[in-house]
């Protein structure tokens, strides 16, 4: 073989040059056949002259560059979409592409066509996933506030921007090309896409915040307004010919086929496969991909982009599990993480800053002014409408910035317009640059101005001690991830001894990680969609608690909620519900799950982050529940008196006092053996001066209980250091079913000397961390009292009667159910 001839053939494998296209000058590429894979360097073959190696290098460089830029911009709270566009700008003609040799090697015309084709496939799949996560029924749930703000967010910039163009054109006159470009950029700047808004909210960890929910509803209203205006404009400007009529008819037929044929087919195939494999989470993956291909091809046949049909096919399908969850899991890695960055980067590769600076005849500055005026009107219109709806000024400003954020939908629109010659190159460059600048500034300002926890970060914190001192009702918020958490939570409720004279209100919150849908959910159980698979698990949880309610009728009442949100921000739902329901104690499951032999079975890192976030900002006391119910062999909800022996470890401090206050309530239960183990150092035997009067009174009351009740015991352990403290705790063995302990202690205390050097779980404190050892087989409740003012501003809305009711009077206190809207127990409907 003549190697020199092989190299010569590669050099001449591709020829290109300018030709006259239908709209403008274009490049014609002539490519040799059989240039797919390289023969290797040892054969004197250049890999960059072949399609596959060049494509792999292009994708790798784009992904690596975008990741590097994202890492640099992450402190400024910029998103991955902005990083991918900037990666294209850096690799394109604005920077590295100024070198002609590099541009011809890395982005030859033939190679550019291939990567555009592959990346478009990824974008089609990604848009299908975005549509799949959308629940358009939430537009029905949007209140008048969201409708007004969403409509204003579109109407203000669109109308005022158009008036600005009309005024400038009437005053100084503008070329027809500039007027057309200005009208186009106004329509784009007025848009707020629902998928983009939810993506931004999720990236900023405020999707399930009060502002996030309002922005979600406003964005879908704004997008609906944009679609209606675009449809009306398209019908008005379309050619009055049979071709135009047939175009509308064919697109209508496509949408009708999606709703009437493809959607029922996919749902039927999913149900059929789930039944045949006895697994509700199984979906017909390959048939769905086939239908997606058919719909995308039909879209191209009918004259619209393939992504149009893919998006509406996704919208037509039910969001959430199983379809949304399974398809997103299988397709996201390839489509969104590998191919989509290339599609976004292409917008940057097509951007050339130097064409903007060198262009004088196209009134670039005037178009940029119109763009900024439109964005300014969008911000002011949104903020003004929000203020009119009595939204706090800070939140109104943040909502205005959020509605100005744009992303993949707008980038896709500009690329389609550029390919269709709707906008010229200069206008395209301005639109991409303005989207980057406005979105970047808006995201940064939202992070700087908005704190979702400020609503429940108050100086006043509800505590068990204050509830006890003021004779207020005990109100518990129980957080649950699955049915395995229920039995021990029921045991905890039973141990708190609800009575007619001292009733309990409790609220269950089923925490579900948001998968397969775009918007977060926090809703009462009875308002959940019965077709949602999460409803089935929530129903099992609710049924278990309702059976417990039935056992203790007239002594406790409950409300049941479900929160579906990203685990990175679901702590906002926990704290918000705790504040709204005036909870005294929030109980969170520990992130480690123990097996039946006492060893650690599973460790859930995201749950640990949730616990840490709640501990930081909760509006009331917090307890971390280390559940060893399986080790104890007591998992039935219907078993009575499952906990026979409870102990509280008291060293000193406000957290131990909070745990003791809860234990004092348990001591009222006649069937329960309650023991207080008081650790004291030898030097403190003569010193009865406690750090707070609350501690002194609680210990005094407990000693009084121990003297008068046979099942209440006070044990004083005299220790000299942490070693002896550990020995006493280790001797507990299996004598107790449940042990309560405070989280924080005085680390300088001699009782803990030598125990503070190392800790695996600092959120549990020194003693709590010790009790996570597999050597112990009892459940543990680690209590933390949130710091607040000494004189808490707690209302007396749930104050209990001082005088006992008459014997035989089974009435519940009026405040107990009327103001809360508690649901009655009716197991026959479940």
Image: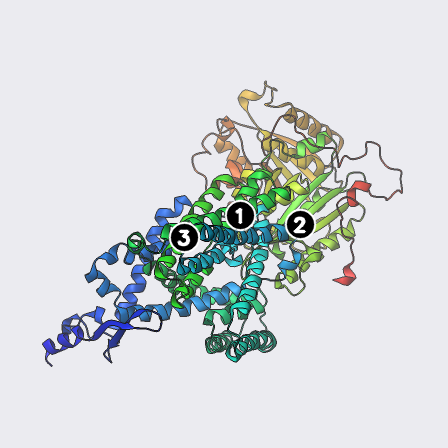
Between 2 and 86, the one nearer to me in the picture = 86
Kindly identify the residue that appears in the image at 33 percent across and 61 percent down: 350
Nearer the N terminus, badge 2 or badge 3?
3
Could you tell whether 409 is left or right of 208 in the image? left
Check residue 206 in the rendering and tell me which mark sits there, or answer none.
Answer: 1
Residue placed furthest toward the top: 686
Q: Give the residue at x 61% y 56%.
A: 484
Image quadrant for the N terminus?
bottom left
Residue closer to the observer: 161 or 620: 161
Please say if 577 is above or below 107: above
Query: Marks 2 and 3, Cα distance to the nearest angstrom?
Result: 55 Å
Report the quarter where the C terminus lies. bottom right
The mark lying in front, picked from 2 and 3, is 3
- Helix or strand or loop: what does disc 1 sit on? loop
Q: Which residue is mark 2?
A: 508
**Which marked residue is nearer to the observer: mark 2 or mark 1?**
1
Real-space CA distance between mark 1 and mark 3, rounded to the nearest whole angstrom? 34 Å
Q: 336 left or right of 270?
A: left
Residue depth check, mark 1 versus mark 3: number of the one nearer the observer? 3
Q: Position of residue 123 (x, y in %)?
A: 43, 66
Q: Secondary structure at mark 2?
A: strand
- Disc number for residue 367: 3
Closer to the camera, 297 or 358? Answer: 358
Q: Secondary structure at mark 3?
A: helix
């Amino acid at each position: 073989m003549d190697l020199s001839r092989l190299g010569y053939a590669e050099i001449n494998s591709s020829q290109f040059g300018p030709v006259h296209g239908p709209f403008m000058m274009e490049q014609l590429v002539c490519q040799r056949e059989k240039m797919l894979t390289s023969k290797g360097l040892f054969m004197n073959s250049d890999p960059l002259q072949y399609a596959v190696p060049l494509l792999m290098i292009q994708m790798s460089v784009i992904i690596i560059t975008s990741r590097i830029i994202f890492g640099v911009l992450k402190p400024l709270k910029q998103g991955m979409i902005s990083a991918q566009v900037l990666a294209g700008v850096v690799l394109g003609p604005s920077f590295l592409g100024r070198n002609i040799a590099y541009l011809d090697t890395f982005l030859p015309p033939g190679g550019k066509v291939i990567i555009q084709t592959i990346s478009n496939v990824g974008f089609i799949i990604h848009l299908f996933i975005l549509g799949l996560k959308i629940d358009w029924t939430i537009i029905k749930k949007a209140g008048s506030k969201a409708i007004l703000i969403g409509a204003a967010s579109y109407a203000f910039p669109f109308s005022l921007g158009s008036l600005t163009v009309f005024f400038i054109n009437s005053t100084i006159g503008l070329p027809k090309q500039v007027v057309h470009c200005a009208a186009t950029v106004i329509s784009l700047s007025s848009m707020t896409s629902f998928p983009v808004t939810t993506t931004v909210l999720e990236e900023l960890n405020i999707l399930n915040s009060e502002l996030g929910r309002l922005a979600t509803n406003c964005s879908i209203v704004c997008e609906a307004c944009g679609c209606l205006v675009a449809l009306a404009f398209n019908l008005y400007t379309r050619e009055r010919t049979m071709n135009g009529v047939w175009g509308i008819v064919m697109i209508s037929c496509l949408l009708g086929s999606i709703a009437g044929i493809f959607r029922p087919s996919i749902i039927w195939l999913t149900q059929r496969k789930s039944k045949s494999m006895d697994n509700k989470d199984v979906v017909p993956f390959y048939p769905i991909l086939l239908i997606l291909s058919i719909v995308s091809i039909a879209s191209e046949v009918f004259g619209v982009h393939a992504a149009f049909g893919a998006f509406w096919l996704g919208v037509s399908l039910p969001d959430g599990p199983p379809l949304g969850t399974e398809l997103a899991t299988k397709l996201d890695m390839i489509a969104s993480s590998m191919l989509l960055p290339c599609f976004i980067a292409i917008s940057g590769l097509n951007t050339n800053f130097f064409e903007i600076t060198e262009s004088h005849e196209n009134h670039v500055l005037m178009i940029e002014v119109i763009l900024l005026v439109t964005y300014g009107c969008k911000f002011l219109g949104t903020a003004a409408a929000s203020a009119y709806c009595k939204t706090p000024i800070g939140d109104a400003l943040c909502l205005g910035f959020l509605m100005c954020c744009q992303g993949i939908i707008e980038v896709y629109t500009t690329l389609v317009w550029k390919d269709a010659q709707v906008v010229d190159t200069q206008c395209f460059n301005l639109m991409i640059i303005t989207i980057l600048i406005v979105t970047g500034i808006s995201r940064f300002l939202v992070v700087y101005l908005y704190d979702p926890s400020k609503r429940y970060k108050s100086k006043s914190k509800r505590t068990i001690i204050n509830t006890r001192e003021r004779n207020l009702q005990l109100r518990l918020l129980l957080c649950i991830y699955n049915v395995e958490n229920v039995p021990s939570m029921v045991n905890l409720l039973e141990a708190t001894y609800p009575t007619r004279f001292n009733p309990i209100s409790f609220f269950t919150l089923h925490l579900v990680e948001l998968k397969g849908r775009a918007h977060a959910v926090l809703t009462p159980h009875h308002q959940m969609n019965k077709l949602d698979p999460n409803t089935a698990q929530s129903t099992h949880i609710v049924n278990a608690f309702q059976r417990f309610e039935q056992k203790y009728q007239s002594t406790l009442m409950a409300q049941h909620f479900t929160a579906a949100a990203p685990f990175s921000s679901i702590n906002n739902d926990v704290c918000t519900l705790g504040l709204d329901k005036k909870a005294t104690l929030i109980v969170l499951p520990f992130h480690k799950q123990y097996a039946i032999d006492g060893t650690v079975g599973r460790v859930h890192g995201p749950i640990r982050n949730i616990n840490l976030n709640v501990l930081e900002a909760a509006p009331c006391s917090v307890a971390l529940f280390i559940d060893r119910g399986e080790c104890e062999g007591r998992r039935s909800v219907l078993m009575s008196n499952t906990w026979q022996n409870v102990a509280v470890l008291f060293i000193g401090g406000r957290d131990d006092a909070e745990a003791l206050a809860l234990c004092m309530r348990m001591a009222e239960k006649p069937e329960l053996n309650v023991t207080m183990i008081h650790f004291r150092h030898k030097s403190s035997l003569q010193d009865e001066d406690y750090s707070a009067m609350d501690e002194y009174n609680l210990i005094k009351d407990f000693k009084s209980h121990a003297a008068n009740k046979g099942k209440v015991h006070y044990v004083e352990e005299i220790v000299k250091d942490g070693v002896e403290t550990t020995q006493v705790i280790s001797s507990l063995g299996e004598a107790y079913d449940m042990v309560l302990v405070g989280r924080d202690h005085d680390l300088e205390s001699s009782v803990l000397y030598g125990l503070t050097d190392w800790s695996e779980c600092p959120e549990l404190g020194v003693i709590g961390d010790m009790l996570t050892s597999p050597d112990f087989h009892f459940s543990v409740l680690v209590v933390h009292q949130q710091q607040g003012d000494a004189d808490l501003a707690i209302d007396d809305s749930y104050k209990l009667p001082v005088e006992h009711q008459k014997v035989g009077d089974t009435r519940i206190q009026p405040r107990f159910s009327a103001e809360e809207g508690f649901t009655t127990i009716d197991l026959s409907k479940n």
